[in-house]
Image (cartoon, rainbow, N blue to C red):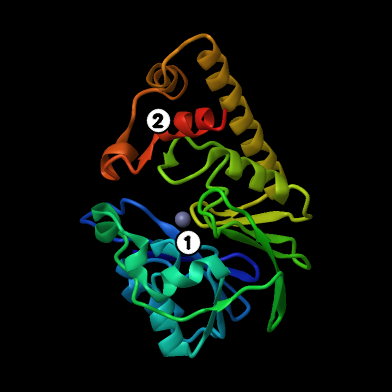
Amino acid sequence: MIRVREWGGVTGFLMGRSMGPYVPYTVHAFLVGNTLIDTGAVHAREDFMHALAGRPVGAVINTHHHEDHIGNNTPVRQVFGAKVYAPEESLPFIADPDKLGLRFYQRVVWGCPDPSEASPLGASIELPGHVFQVIHTPGHSPDHVCLLEPDKGWLFTGDLFCGRTVRYLRRDEDFELILSSLKKLCTFDFSTIFCGLKGRVENGSQALEAKIKSMEELKVRVMDLHRAGCSRREIRKRVLGREGAMYYLTAAHFSKQHMVDSILNQE
Ligand SMILES: [Zn+2]
């Protein structure tokens, strides 16, 4: 499945693997000038490469090493001769995707990328038509970066933002690091967020502030119940409710309990 949208200078490619009438997870890649930000998932390759045909692609920037963001680095390099840039810490995973240690559901939903080559990103990168400031924003993954196009006020947030409220955390995500990375982004000037999950988010700084507020409120509730002597499981039930589809579909890789545990593990 692919859906292509033009957002005044940014083209969004929403993609996912169709399973009958369902597309269980989707992800965005963005084309800005001739720079592609992330390359989506292996299982959306045919649709994605078809949608890219005839467009100028001179470079790729990966926001982090996850399989749904680097999945088509190889065919984009081969077809367009594009040069790929990624955070330095992502490079070993891009070169050897076995290091990703993909779970069964990740192989089914996204697929395992081919080994590929990339060059390390510095503090900023100048590409035809656009300069991107590279902001290190760990939390979703240790290598994660966001990309700011300061002249346009565009902020590409990879998987860091993912909506104003989030109820699930991946087992290897770090609540406190995500929160401090989101706060770091607030110190930059931007108007629109381009999110790997949500696509274009207008009034980006308000959306970011709303997310920070919601995470801080969640943290206060969790800590209050913890001080009142509730177990971690009880806190999860009272604050976030029962585990839902994400928990079962990902075999507990994403869960509400990880959210509570990550908050309490900081203390
Ligand atoms: Zn990710």
Quarter of the image with the N terminus in it? bottom left
Task: State left or right for residue 185 relative to residue 114.
Answer: right
Q: Is residue 247 above or below residue 89?
A: above
User: Looking at the picture, does residue 202 appear above or below residue 210?
Assistant: below
Question: Residue most toward the top?
Answer: 228
Amino acid tagged 1: His
- The disc label shown at residue 257, or none: 2
Whether residue 44 appears in this view of the structure is: no
Whether disc 1's CB lies below 8 Å from ligand 1 is answered no
> Neighbour class for label 2 at 10 Å: few (<14), some, many (≥20)?
many
Q: Which residue is mark 1?
A: 28
Across and down, in percent, residue 68 comes to 40, 62
Q: How far across and how far down the image is residue 237, in percent?
A: 39, 19
Task: Provide residue 213's location: percent of width, then percent of height.
Answer: 66, 32
Q: Nearer the viewer, residue 223 or 19?
A: 223
Residue name at image x 59 percent, y 56 percent: 157
Front tag of 1 and 2: 2
Element on which disc 1 rests: strand
Circle 2: residue type: Gln
Q: Is mark 2 within 8 Å of ligand 1?
A: no
Give the distance between the C-alpha atoms of the residues marked 1 and 2, in whole angstroms: 27 Å
Compared with 213, 101 (above or below) is below
What residue lies at 72% left-to-right and 48% top-to-bottom? 184
